Amino acid sequence: MEREKFSSRLGFILISAGCAIGLGNVWRFPYIVGKYGGAAFVLIYLLFLVILGLPVVVMEFAVGRASQRSVALSFDRLETKGTKWHWFKYPAMAGNYLLMMFYTTIGGWMVYYIVKMARGDFAGLDAAGVEGEFGAMLSNPGLMAGLMVLVVVLGFAICAAGLQKGVERITKVMMVSLMVLMVALAVNSVLLEGGQEGLSFYLKPDFQKLKEAGLGEAVFAALGQAFFTLSIGMGAIAIFGSYIGREQRLAGEAVNVLVLDTVVALMAGLIIFPACFAYDIQPDAGPNLLFITLPHVFNAMPGGRIWGSLFFLFMFFAAISTIVAVFQDLISFATDLTGCSVKKAAAITCVAICVLSLPCVLGFNLWSSFQPLGPGSTVLDLEDFLVSNNVLPLGSLVYVAFCTSHYGWGWRNFLEEANTGKGLAFPSGVRIYLKWVLPAVMLFIFLQGYYAKFFS
Ligand code: PHE
């Protein structure tokens, strides 16, 4: 059977960008940058994006396109007979599930904020007031669970509508609206009175700050953020390779996705950091940073209620386009593996995700005494750490090894697939770098990161 394809190249780029651009850009990036001291961290992050992340994006696309399958079967199809690369599907799928187990909860926060903004609930509140509102939501497990279920069901409904009708059509509109509004808000924030200090925090590298935050841990976090934002390491972006034709070379497509993704993340920082300093909010506030900063921006803006609700709506779009992309992967995993229908796979996976997402919700209230990564940490932090700092970097290493080693798919096959079509070619001279240097650098960052985080 011919596999369903995207209707256009733009559709493919936007939906891959839709998978890459998500909460990682608007929610995670600012808070991680804030936590690790600002501009110097951003530099390291950008470097990692290009030297470590970009090649892996090309590899995932290539494996997806050559195999025409999701990660459930892509390695089975491409590996040399008798090898065990296909076992990777299990950790990869675990990673996809684990990601959704906290991602959908944050998606739910977005929905809540769309409504609260529209109702004007934040009007006139000071910093403590806004934090109070956020805290009240966290301490209400019923509310958060309800929001999470809403997000999950919506995501699966879009998937069930089919690839072109559902995912592609909706994503296109969402991504474009988000980007337009972000530019406007970034300009607004940069011009805020008292925001200058935030700009220099964000844009003027101060390596001293990095040291204060813990250099080893910061570098580890930059690695995690780079891989998280590109969605690489567990087949999430590979699947889009399986939906495209061979007209374009893959490196060019990967660069497009990376540029769009980075622009959105950098813009999110431009919106948030000036506002932090203008309204006296600590940039290292953690996962709630976005939610305690933005209400002030809109309070101070004429028509802020409308703009605020729209902005949270578009950010929710960014989140749901990622959720839909990953759900697509989970569904495809189930259908490729068992041969059941898409509708059946969607229904079962939907229930599973709702149940599995509960620990993250409860981690903020009923289970808040469980602090797995040190004082104040939550289930969310643990799940995020497992995915971003473990599954993604190690999974990326599997892709790298698979594409560069003749025990796997092999360099020649990879290069041929990546370079089929028109556009930017993947340079053949980087094999040694990819085969030896990149894995060594990554393993080093990984090991010293663990050491810095847990033993020093
Ligand atoms: N890149 C997504 C984001 O930035 C998150 C993601 C990670 C999606 C890994 C899929 C796989 O929000």
Image (cartoon, grey):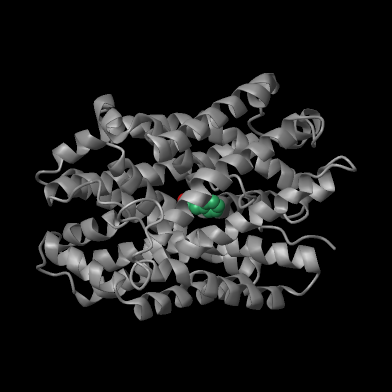
Quarter containing the C terminus: top left
Which of these two is toward me, 134 or 124? 134
Which of these two is toward me, 123 or 368? 368
Q: Is residue 219 above or below residue 112?
A: above
Q: Is residue 132 visible?
A: yes
Which of these two is toward me, 145 or 63? 145
Residue 159 found in image quarter: bottom right
Q: Residue at x 29, y 73 (%)?
A: 139
Q: How many marks?
A: 0
Q: Position of residue 205 (x, y in %)?
A: 27, 27
Q: Is residue 211 above or below residue 148?
A: above
Quarter containing the N terminus: bottom right
Q: Position of residue 218 (x, y in %)?
A: 37, 35
Q: Position of residue 210 (x, y in %)?
A: 30, 30
Q: Position of residue 123 (x, y in %)?
A: 13, 70
Residue at the far front in the pictured view: 455
Q: Is residue 166 above or below residue 191?
A: below
Residue 437 found in image quarter: top right
Q: Is residue 421 visible?
A: no
Q: Residue at x 28, y 43 (%)?
A: 34
Q: Is residue 426 above or below residue 141?
A: above
Q: Residue at x 42, y 61 (%)?
A: 379
Residue at the far right in the pictured view: 81
Q: Is residue 145 left or right of residue 15?
A: left
Q: Is residue 4 left or right of residue 257?
A: right
